[in-house]
């Protein structure tokens, strides 16, 4: 089973700063199977990025995804107040099945 | 607009049963694969189950206790939960699953989520 490990657990930044979130897989993951989600308190997750680097519909271009193999990154170029949230990476696997990383919380410094 | 609305959550005793529902609107439900995902209090996301028009899969943590089903005529997804345990306490979300060829690659992701329904298993 491929495990996703996200780092850091918490990222403390100010509005306007750049956020870089990491998602590391225990084995190689096909890029097209890697997605990122944003979740705000009391809300459902929202799809941000699919295929490691494709933005979902309506997602601002300050969000970008990159990476391949075992290392994937979500970058928020300039944090807006509404971007402070928890972010999860997700991978698709055999059976089919899905697994999520444990999440990275982006909080206001 | 495209929408998923869960219902059926509540308080149930350990060993009890509950049936969750997810009503879909704004898209052709029968054309899409669906999934249930849960989130225990203060924890991360855990995939629970998946269904197409011809089959289903389950996480090991719920296999043999939960049953996913769908009624395309009613645009509805269900999760029958039996032999419930305290560790099943969570918010349960339904989500639309996209699994598609965008040549040259095959993609999978969950693009529409409901707001969730809360299940509490406690005596």
Image: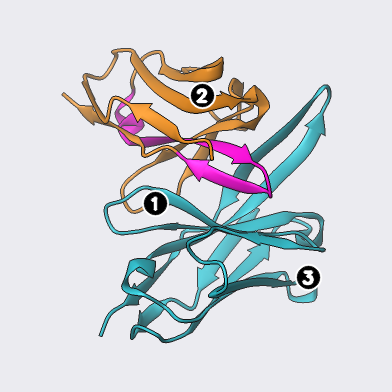
Chain colours: A orange, B cyan
Identify the residue at horizontal 49%, vertical 20% (top origin).
A72
Q: Nearer the viewer, residue A17 or B105?
A: B105
Left or right: residue B73 versus residue A30 is: right
Q: Secondary structure at mark 3?
A: helix
Identify the residue at horizontal 60%, vertical 26% (top origin).
A29
Q: Position of residue B33 (x, y in %)?
A: 72, 55
Q: CA distance from mark 3 to mark 1?
A: 27 Å
Residue under circle 2?
Answer: A60
Q: Nearer the viewer, residue B29 or B99?
A: B99
Up/down of A40 relative to A74, above or below:
below
Up/down of A76 relative to A49, above or below:
above
Left or right: residue B84 versus residue A66 is: left
Asked if marks 2 and 1 fall on the same chain, the answer is: yes
Left or right: residue B122 versus residue B93 is: left
Residue under circle 3?
Answer: B72
Q: Secondary structure at mark 1?
A: loop
| Chain bearing mark 3 | B
Image quadrant containing the C terminus of chain B: bottom left
Q: Are marks 2 and 3 in contact (CB under 8 Å)?
A: no
Q: Residues within 10 Å of mark 1 (few under 14, many from 20)?
A: few
Residue placed furthest toward the left = A109
The quarter of the picture where residue B14 lies is: bottom left
Is residue A97 a member of the stretch shown in magenta? yes
Q: Position of residue B107 (x, y in %)?
A: 71, 33
- Residue B78 in view (yes/no): no
Is residue B16 a member of the stretch shown in magenta? no
Identify the residue at horizontal 37%, vertical 75% (top origin).
B85
Q: Which residues are magenta?
A: A80-100
Q: Position of residue A46 (x, y in %)?
A: 49, 42
């Amino acid at each position: 089973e491929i495990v996703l490990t996200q780092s850091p657990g918490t990222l403390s930044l100010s509005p306007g700063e750049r956020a870089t979130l990491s998602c590391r897989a225990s084995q190689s993951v096909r890029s097209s199977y890697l997605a990122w989600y944003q979740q705000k308190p009391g809300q459902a997750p929202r799809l941000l990025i699919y295929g490691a680097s494709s933005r979902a519909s309506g997602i601002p271009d300050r969000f970008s995804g990159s990476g391949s193999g075992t290392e994937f990154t979500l970058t928020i170029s300039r944090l807006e107040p509404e971007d402070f949230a928890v972010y999860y990476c997700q991978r698709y696997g055999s059976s089919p099945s899905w697994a999520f990383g444990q999440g990275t919380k982006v909080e206001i410094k | 607009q495209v929408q998923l609305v869960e219902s059926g959550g509540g308080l149930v005793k350990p060993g009890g049963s509950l049936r969750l529902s997810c009503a879909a609107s704004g898209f052709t439900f029968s054309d899409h694969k669906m999934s249930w995902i849960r989130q225990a209090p203060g924890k991360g996301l855990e995939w629970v189950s998946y269904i197409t028009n011809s089959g289903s899969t389950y996480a090991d943590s719920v296999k043999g206790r939960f049953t996913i089903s769908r009624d395309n005529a009613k645009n509805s997804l269900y999760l029958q939960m039996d032999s419930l345990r305290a560790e099943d306490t969570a918010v349960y979300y339904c989500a639309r699953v996209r699994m598609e060829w965008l040549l040259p690659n095959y993609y999978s992701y969950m693009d529409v989520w409901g707001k969730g329904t809360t299940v509490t298993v406690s005596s």
